[in-house]
Amino acid sequence: MGCSFSGLNALYDAVNGGGDVWINENRFKIVRQLGEGGFAYVYLVKEVVSDSSSALASGLAKKVKDPSHLSDDRTYAIKKVLIQNNEQLDLVREEIRVSSLFSHPNLLPLLDHSIISVKPTQEGSWNHEAYLLFPVHLDGTLLDNSKAMTSRKEFFSASDVLQIFRQLCAGLKHMHNLGPPYAHNDVKPGNVLLSHRKGKCPLAILMDFGSARPARKQIRSRSEAVQLQEWASEHCSAPFQAPELWDCPSDADIDERTDIWSLGCTLFAIMYGVSPFEYALGESGGSLQLAIINAQIKWPAGPKQPYPEEFHHFVTWMLQPQPALRPCIDDIIYHVDKLVTKFSQ
């Protein structure tokens, strides 16, 4: 892993209105902050190159394997992670390793990275900082778009619902078909980037592989079951978390169908803006865990032209509390393709 103290010092300057950031041998200028959460911050940056007329002449262009990931205007996103201990350092290193396994148009690629050792200061207790460089998508996440649409009482068309969902399935199929299969473990609207395209359905890209792990686990004791539940409570988003990760049996085979449950919740959210269990609790209150384990689904009032009943059946098919009854990603893609043919204009 590369590192650069000049990148560290410059980032503080840049955030305060000056300086540049270096990731290994490539230089970037901070444009503005895009977001933050926990110990991570995301910045819009612009690559600084000697020949400003061509992105193909940049240092990054020589490093990135797929030219389609290069930005025409040299803008990218940098995720900065503050690391306080060795456990967090291992998690970031694992995220970098796992991200390098994937190459698919519907999975966000990691373009470059560096991890820097720093001295603790009065402002913070971290001892490392990581910088991860990604393509930037300024139209926000599916969650951002859904909130904005909800405020305007707007809904995605039936065709766009299917096309967005189909793209997520394609990205997950790539992960599930690896040897060994990988589960994303945190599929949700906040981890789906949307890029609007004139005259076309939005481009949907699944991101954030910090929770991605080999999908198949054999649980053979109560302690292993509790360990998995504790891991899930830290790394998975509760409203989209599969029942077996809430209440794992002492003898269970966990596989990539945990993602299928999250996909079902996400399809519901593409249509109605929230997970089915957030909606159910908003209507009646109660326990999120019990609502998920019992698959208590309520259907909101949809657009003036309601979504076809087939969409509801499709969601219910994915939200089978028993993992063995849940379809796999190939089954999902076969079915969504039939729906696309039937309902897309």
Image: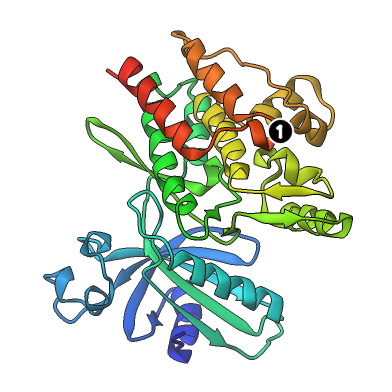
Q: Examine the image and state in which quarter residue 325 appears.
A: top right
Viewer-proximal residue among 206 and 37:
206
Q: Along the line of sight, which residue is nearer the eye, 152 or 320?
A: 320
**Residue at the image point whose x is 56% and y is 45% from the top:** 187
Residue 275 occupies quadrant: top right
Check disc 1 and report the residue beneath it: 322
* Residue 124 appears in the picture as rendered: no
**Looking at the image, can residue 120 be seen?**
yes
* Residue at point 47%, 78% (across, down): 11
* The C terminus, quarter of image: top left
Type of amino acid at the residue the image marks with label 1: Gln
The image's colour scheme reads rainbow
Q: Could you say where residue 295 lies in the image, as x and y percent from the top left?
A: 72, 26
Is 270 positioned to the left or the right of 104 in the image? right
Residue at image position (50%, 30%) is 270
Q: Residues within 10 Å of mark 1 (few under 14, many from 20)?
A: few
Vertical placement of residue 49 versus 109, above or below: below
Image coordinates of residue 3 in percent, x first then y, are 46, 87
**Whole-percent x and y of residue 27?**
32, 80
Total label count?
A: 1
Q: In the orientation shown, which residue stands out farthest toward the right?
A: 222
Left/right placement of residue 162 relative to residue 287 reads: left
Q: Nearer the viewer, residue 204 or 83?
A: 204
Image location of residue 235, percent across then percent down: 68, 56
Task: Judge whether 191 appears above or below 301 on screen.
Answer: below
In the picture, measured across the screen, residue 48 lies left or right of residue 258, that is left
Up/down of 233 relative to 201, above or below: below
Element under disc 1? loop
Q: 17 or 194, which lies in front? A: 194
The residue lying at 81 percent from left, 43 percent from top is: 247
